[in-house]
Amino acid sequence: MKLTANKINQQLSKGLSPIYFISGEDPLLAGEVADAIRVQARRQGYDERESHSADAKFDWQSLRAGLDNLSLFASRKIVEIRLTTGKPGREGGAAIVELVADPPADTLFIITAPKADAKAKWVKTLEKDAVWVAIRMLTPEQLPGWLANRMQAAGLSFDQEAIEILAARVEGNLLAAQQEISKLVLLADGQQVTAEIVQQSVADGARFDVFQLADAAVGQDVTRAIRILYGLRKEGIAPALTLWALAREASLLVSLWSRVQQGASPGQAMNEARVWNARQALLSKALHNHDERSVRRLAAKMGLTDRIVKGASPGQPWNALLELLLCLAQPQQVRLAGYEV
C-alpha cells in the first residue's frame, strides 16, 4: 500500500501494519510520519525500540539472526532501519523481501530512506505487502497553503502578505519553516502575524537545489531563478554542478528548437527527446518565447560559460552562470545591469 504523508493517520486508525517504509528527502515530513507510527505503536504496547543505520557495510544476516533469537517473553519492539543511501544492495534487498514475507511476531519495523527506486524488487514488495509512505516535496505553489494550515494549527492569525514573505524565506526547507512558525508563536504573543513581523524575525532559511534552478530558468521566472542562484552559491554548491543543470536545459532547448525548425511540432519534438510529460508544459512555454536569435545566443553563452567554469577562459564562474541563466530565462531581452552574484 502506497500513501502520501497526509494519509498516515487515517491508515493508523485502521490498525498497525508490521512494516512501514518511509521514503523522501524532507526530514520534517519524514520525521512526523515516523513519530505518528511510534505514538500509535506505544499505545499498543511496543515499549522497546532499537535503531540501525544500514550503510554499504551493514550486516543484514546479524540483524535477521537477532530477530530470530528474540525471547518468547520479550516485550513488543519497534525496530528502525535507516537506509543511508536509499540502496540496500543485493543482500539488503533480499533481506527486506524476506522480512516482508515473514515478519517476526511482536515486532514493528520502520524502514526509512532518502529516496527509493520504485522499480526495485524490494520496493515493489514493500508497496505490495507493507505500507509505503512516499514523501513528496511541496511545489512553490503548494507552500503558502501548507504554511497557512501549519500557522492555523499553531493558533496564529496572519495576513496573506505575511504568508507570502514567509514562503519566500523558507522555500525548499520545511524544517526551517516549522521552526520559524514556532518562533512566531512566541513573538506574536497573541497578535496577528503581519508582514512586518515576518520581515523582522524570520531568517532566510530557503534551501534550493540545481533542479529548482533549472526549472525556474526554463519557466522564465527570472526573479526566482536569480534568488535560487544566490542561494546555491551561499550554500557552497560547486559551480560545475550548477553549470551541469543549466547546460542540460540549454542543450535540450536548443535541440528541441532545431527539431521544431525541421518541421516537428513541439509535442513531437519533446516526445522524440523523451521529455517527461510533467515538464512538457514548461518547455513548450520556453520554446514559444525563444526565437532563432535567442537560441543562437544561448548556445554561444553555454559554450563560453563551460570554458569559464572549467578555467579554460578568463572570467568569474558565478557571473558567467548568471548570464547563462538570463539567456534561458529572458530570451527576448537580457539585462545584466544591476545583477552580480
Image: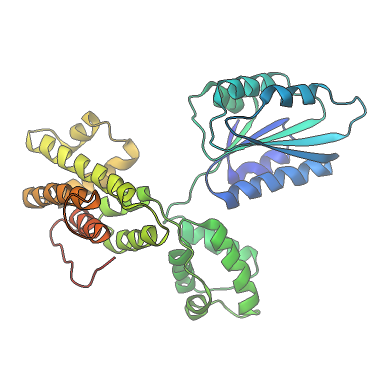
268 relative to 225 in the view: left or right: left
Q: For the N terminus, give its image quadrant.
A: top right
Q: Residue at coordinates 31% horizontally, 52% vertically from top-left?
A: 239
Number of marks drawn:
0
View extreme (right): residue: 73
Residue 152: x, y in percent?
A: 61, 66
Q: Residue at coordinates 54% horizontally, 21% vertically from top-left?
A: 121
- The image quadrant that residue 153 belongs to is bottom right
Residue 197: x, y in percent?
A: 52, 79
Q: Residue at coordinates 21% horizontally, 58% vertically from top-left?
A: 320
Residue 80: x, y in percent?
A: 70, 37
Q: For the C terminus, give its image quadrant.
A: bottom left
Nearest to the observer: residue 27 or residue 290:
27
Question: Taking 233 as reference, is 101 above or below it?
Answer: above
Nearest to the observer: residue 65 or residue 264:
65
- The image quadrant that residue 331 belongs to is bottom left
Q: Residue at coordinates 74% horizontally, 44% vertically from top-left?
A: 38
Nearest to the observer: residue 248 or residue 282:
248
Report if residue 220 is visible in the image: yes
Residue 88: x, y in percent?
A: 57, 28
Report if residue 156 is visible in the image: no
177 relative to 285 in the view: left or right: right
Q: How is the image coloured?
A: rainbow
204 relative to 334 in the view: left or right: right
Question: Taking 11 as reference, is 61 above or below it?
Answer: above
